[in-house]
Image (cartoon, rainbow, N blue to C red):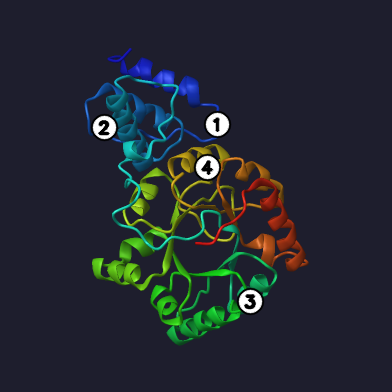
Amino acid sequence: MRDDTAAMAQAILAHHAAVFAGFPPEPAPEPTRADPVYQAALQACSTLGFIAHDAECLAEAWLARSLRVGAFQPECWPDEPADFGLQPVPRAHAFASCPPQLGLYGVLPDAQWVGRMARAGVPTVQLRFKSDDAAAVAREVRAAVEAVQGTAALLFINDHWREAIQAGAYGVHLGQEDLDALSPADLATLRASGVRLGVSTHGYAEMVRADAVGPSYIAMGAVFPTTLKKMATAPQGVGRLGVYARLLRTYPQVAIGGIGAEQFAEVLSTGVGSIAVVRALVAAPDPEAAAAQLMGLLRDHSPPRNRP
């Protein structure tokens, strides 16, 4: 079979199609290698619905594993960090660490909500404040930092990393475009500040990109459909979340996107240690009660949370 690309692709599909059901096939990208294992994996992963740069990433990993173990193993989905070129642990390039289990992670629109959920006991909170007014942004970030004082909450600031450093926030969360926009000097400033860094990812290629900077945690999503923002990629689903979590097992992980109380058990079954929610808190009739319920679900499925 080692030289029969079509047969190898079919073998991969036979073992894994059920896990990734529900995704329409994607066009296979132009292959960059002649190796039959690489080409089989590229075709199979495209058929399973992985977009071009993720199918390419998987095909490279499948080839790396086959060379490492000396055999083509269609039954084994790639999940060894080294096969994807991820940094070995301890990482040469890494941000300050955060707890391995971040627990319930509330993504909140303003400092008032940040303080309210921090006082309700939510262990990790993020200020996602949208404004083109630089002065307003700086004020809101400072207010959010003040709002968590006297609580145990860890505060991450979405996007506004300079203001976060100036205000003394615990961490910063960046999307892929924000990460790509950082100059080497910006990245060095961020790392030297001691601030924790979280990065959003939506598939394998973005995970590899995030790992290159060694963030404090990696967020994965959107797991389910969400109406809160327009997503460039389709919802990833629990099947994909499970294989992502195995690959990123040396990182704290946050699942995000359309997750409500009814999905907590299946999301946590993947091994992800934190779930980010937006509407489940801010749209709840009683946000404090909703927070208590969701934290209870996390406690039922997760090991105790340790602070660094």
Q: For the N terminus, which image quadrant?
A: top left
Q: Are marks 3 and 4 in contact (CB under 8 Å)?
A: no
Q: Which residue is mark 2?
A: 31
* Total number of numbered discs in the rendering: 4
Lower position in the chain sequence, tag 4 or tag 1: 1
Q: Nearer the viewer, mark 3 or mark 2?
A: 3
Is 134 above or below relative to 249? below
Tag 3: residue type? Gly
N-term-proximal mark, 3 vs 2: 2
Question: Mark 4 highlights which residue?
Answer: 241
Q: CA distance from mark 1 to mark 2?
A: 24 Å
Residue depicted at 22% across the width and 26% down the height: 34
Of 29 and 67, the residue lying toward us: 67
Sooner in the amino-acid sequence: mark 1 or mark 2: 1
Q: Amino acid at mark 2?
A: Pro
- The reply to whether discs 3 and 1 touch (Cβ–Cβ < 8 Å) is no
